[in-house]
Amino acid sequence: MTVDNSVEQEIKDYFTQKGIKFSDNSSSYEQLDFTINNKNGQPAFHLDVKEKRQKYNLNLDFCSLKIE
């Protein structure tokens, strides 16, 4: 059984493999996920990653709604 990596993890792995200096802010709700730094260690590019999630099941057959 294989485990699919998240897009965030794949980006982290890629940056690491290519020697790209970056800051990982993916656990923050207030900052963009990644900051790519230039050769001097200064922020040069910001990247926010969004993954599609499974659609919600909106089937309401399991309950009865009474609207008055």
Image (cartoon, rainbow, N blue to C red):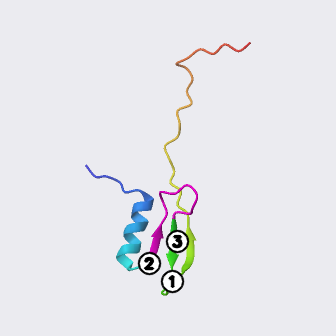
Residue 63 screen position, x and y as percent: 55, 17
Mark 3: which amino acid?
Answer: Thr
State how far apart marks 1 and 3 are (Cα). Answer: 10 Å
Do the residues bearing badges 1 and 2 touch, measured as CB atoms within 8 Å? yes
Q: Is residue 41 magenta-colored?
A: no
As drawn, the label of residue 21 is 2
Tell me the number on the disc at residue 35.
3
Name the residue nearer the viewer: 31 or 20.
Answer: 31
Residue type at the position of mark 2:
Lys
Give the spatial CA distance, label 2 vs label 3. Answer: 9 Å
Earlier along the polypeptide chain: callout 1 or callout 2? 2
Q: Which residue is mark 1?
A: 38
Q: Secondary structure at mark 1?
A: loop
Residue at x 50%, y 46% (from the top left corner): 53
Name the one closer to the observer, 27 or 4: 27
**Local crowd size for mark 1, using a 10 Å CA cut-off: few (<14), some (14–19), many (≥20):** few
Residue 31 is inside the magenta segment: yes
Please tell me which residue lies in front, 24 or 55: 24
* In the image: residue 65, left or right of residue 52: right
